[in-house]
Image (spheres, grey):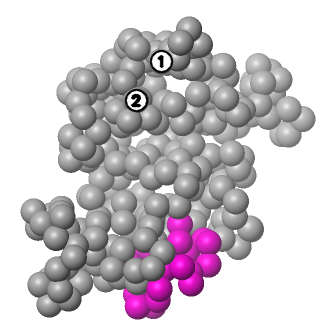
């Protein structure tokens, strides 16, 4: 495994009762890159994420992270090694404040992961780091806002903060701009650029202008297999990609 490759798959395959959702996928994610996984609906993108983070077991193939075979590890063990993901569906506590959400995510570092019911004073030691994380995603002004009151784009920013609380080296973002208006998309793109310093990001994203702006390398999936890979200019000119995914778009 080359030194600049932090995450790699070799012939990664997933079958569901005879249906091959992911078919022999080879990925190489370079350290410090922002790498996109794109493709039409049903191409296998989220399934690849689930295989990388062990939310699903692979039928065959190998996942290598920082030179270690993690194909058989439990999801929690993968996350502890620094490979952490977000989800398409919002995963925050709507009735807690923004600060409290991040504090819950930080509890693991104290070895008190199930003590979120303890009083304010006993958990106050986490507030400093929680506020740092909120500042990193431009949410420090919202620290005491009840999460349900946040605009959608700010909720996605909060999810980034709670994910950063796990101190990921590689961050997997599953459709981070899904369902957003233009203003919120711009907010989240700027935040991804900001938090990418010192990290590797692999993202599934349908918004092609976002992919073009953010990503160093793009892997295109179709029917569970790798169709093309390169920078945006390269894949957007590929005839097979034009037919399978981009259509008439430049």
Q: Is residue 216 above or below residue 178?
A: above
Residue at 67 percent of width and 22 percent of height:
222
* Proximity of marks 2 and 1: CB atoms separated by less than 8 Å: yes
The rendered magenta stretch, by its main secondary structure, is classed as: helix
Q: Is residue 3 above or below residue 122?
A: above
Q: Give the mark, 2 or 1, whose residue is nearer the N terminus.
A: 1
Q: Quadrant of the N terminus?
A: top left
State left or right for residue 73 relative to residue 176.
left
Residue under circle 1? 14
Residue at 46 percent of width and 89 percent of height:
145
Distance between mark 2 and mark 1 Cα atoms: 9 Å
Residue under circle 2? 56
Residue 220, position in %: x, y?
A: 63, 29
Q: Residues within 10 Å of mark 1 (few under 14, many from 20)?
A: many
State left or right for residue 59 relative to residue 250.
left
Residue at 56 percent of width and 51 percent of height:
88
Q: Which corner quadrant of the image does residue 68 belong to?
A: top left
In terms of depth relative to the viewer, which is nearer, 152 or 94?
Answer: 94
Q: Which residues are magenta?
A: 134-156
């Amino acid at each position: 495994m080359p030194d600049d490759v932090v995450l790699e798959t070799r012939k990664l395959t997933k079958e569901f009762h005879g249906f091959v959702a992911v078919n022999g996928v080879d990925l190489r994610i370079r350290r410090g890159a922002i790498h996109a996984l794109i493709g039409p609906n049903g191409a296998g993108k989220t399934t690849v994420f689930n295989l990388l983070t062990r939310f699903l077991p692979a039928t065959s193939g190998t996942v290598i992270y920082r030179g270690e075979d993690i194909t058989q590890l439990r999801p929690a063990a993968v996350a502890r090694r620094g490979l952490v993901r977000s989800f398409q569906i919002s995963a925050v506590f709507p009735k807690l404040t923004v600060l409290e959400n991040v504090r819950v995510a930080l509890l693991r570092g104290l070895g008190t992961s199930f003590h979120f019911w303890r009083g304010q004073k006993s958990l106050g030691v986490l507030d400093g780091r929680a506020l740092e994380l909120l500042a990193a995603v431009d949410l420090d002004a919202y620290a005491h806002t009840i999460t349900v009151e946040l605009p959608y784009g700010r909720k996605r920013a909060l999810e980034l903060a709670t994910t950063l609380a796990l101190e990921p080296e590689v961050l997997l973002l599953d459709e981070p701009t899904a369902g957003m208006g233009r203003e919120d998309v711009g907010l989240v793109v700027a935040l991804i650029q900001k938090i990418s310093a010192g990290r590797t990001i692999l993202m599934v994203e349908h918004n092609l202008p976002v992919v073009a702006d953010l990503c160093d390398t793009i892997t295109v999936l179709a029917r569970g297999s790798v169709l093309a890979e390169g920078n945006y200019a390269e894949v957007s000119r590929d005839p097979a990609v034009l037919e399978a995914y981009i259509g008439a778009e430049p």
